[in-house]
Amino acid sequence: MTFLDWTILVLRVALPALILPGIVIPLVWYERRVAAFIQDRPGPNRVGPFGLLQSPADILKLFMKEEVIPASTDKLLFQIAPALAIFAALSTFAVIPYGGTLSIGGRQIPLIGADISIGILYVFAITSLSVYAIVLAGWASNNKFSLMGGIRSGAQLISYELAMTTAGAGVILAASSFKLSDIVSMQQGTWLGFIPRWNLFPQFLGFLVFFISTFAETNRLPFDLPEAEAELVAGYHTEYSAMHFGSFFLAEYLNIMVACAMTATLYLGGWSLPGFDPHGVLGVALSVLIFAAKTGFLVTVFIWVRWTLPRFRYDQLMRLGWKVFLPAALANLFWAAALEMWRMAK
Amino acid sequence: MDRLIFDVAAVVAVLFAALMVLNRNPVRSVLALVVSFFFLAIGYVLLWAPFIAAIQVIVYAGAILVLFLFVLMLLNVPLEDVAGTEPRPIQQILGGAAILLFTIGLVELLSGYGAKNVTQAGAMDFARGRIGPLARLIYSEYLLPFEALSVLLLAALVGAFVLVEREKRP
């Protein structure tokens, strides 16, 4: 490999990791503005044009604040937990294809960090590790509220991970591949000339289960029990201050983007659109924009739901996860298998 | 390059496994085991078995050890008190003998294999990161052992319930 090849490889892997934390800044502003719109109030509109500089100001504040580590905490684990949260959120992006294949000067550059043969399993594996960040934060804080939040989060993540993975298995079956690039390419084209071949249509049940489970996986309303402020102060990050808290905050928004990007890739055709074949630099840039638009739409749904639905009770949450979503995900898996057998028989 | 990463991952995995045993704080022990499993998964990736690596992280590091951690946190297990429990001489002798025996066995076993066999295993078709041939083997030739294993796990589950029930009744 020449120096240029190395540079391209590093850029492919590092670009999402460098750009995405930057996107979080306007994303926080966007959420606050949408929330304000839903609640019929102006929202942040004083700092900079349209209040756009509010988030940078808040982040600056977080950096400037004093870092307080309570005396009775487990110092090492207390400080590792936020870093772990960001690690889990960022490393997922490495396998998500975010655009078509760029060809410059005879080089083929697929816009994906690493197109590994177990892409979707890698995402599930990293997601299953992200639970440690919250459980550890809760335990290391040495605080009742934090511990309750951490344990709730652990139980919730494990319960919904099961339904989410089973729903994802339907997509794996339809694509007969674990590669996310294969999953995107099998969703190109149309049925009957006008329905896009997205997994959304044949596996609508799977889509519902997967997308709603991601709400629980990212600890967002209506499933934000780990940080239910009415009962637990702030849950697992009660004892955290300044940028340690900021890391959890950043990780939460990164996780929302991961969840939406994964849903867009698995069920909405990723960067592809029917009848669109990315050619040249402009076409590939357009494919990145299509992917961003699909992800952005799902992020908007996330925010919309947050300001619309009240929080679930804990027993309702568990009942929904085990008694509704898991059977629904299994039914979807059988349905996907039946479709696949029918397709093979044809 | 691959060899270097593999060696580093192997050393770190063994190091954290030792840390798991030596640590007095049970929660930290579990965490050391998580790190050890993670680096073991890196080893699997470099042996052309990415599927096994992913399953290793999802099932062991991501699910089973989280449950371990749960139990430890809910019961709030105290630090192990090492000071008052000096091992008896017979324990020391037997323990030392066991370590010696294990080391000899391990060296004997490893000298039979070695790096040559690792590359041979990597050249095998089904080990080349492909999952289809592995699935075919599991669901045809090894179907009976595979199913028997799951029944074994079920038996362990039932056994745990029986033990709990017996304790409840006076």
Image (cartoon, helix red, strand yellow):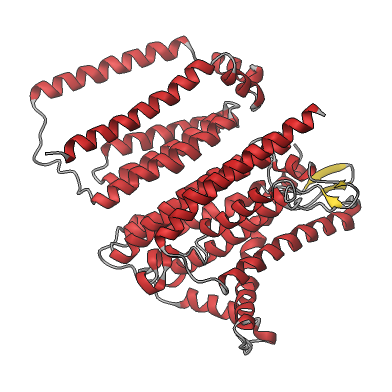
The image shows residue A105 at horizontal and vertical percentages of: 89, 45
The image shows residue A166 at horizontal and vertical percentages of: 57, 42
Residue A247, placed above or below residue A98:
below
Q: What residue sits 57% from the left and 13% below the top?
A: B141
The image shows residue A301 at horizontal and vertical percentages of: 65, 66
The quadrant of the picture occupied by the C terminus of chain A is: top right
The quadrant where residue A235 appears: bottom left
B7 or A173: which is nearer to us? A173
Taking the image as shown, residue A21 lies to the left or right of residue B147, namely right
The image shows residue B147 at horizontal and vertical percentages of: 48, 21
Residue B102, placed above or below residue B16:
above
Q: What residue sits 34% from the left and 64% below the top?
A: A146
Evaluate whether residue A231 shows in this view: yes
Q: What residue sits 26% from the left and 17% below the top?
A: B100
The quadrant where residue A44 appears: bottom right
Taking the image as shown, residue B119 lies to the left or right of residue A3, namely left
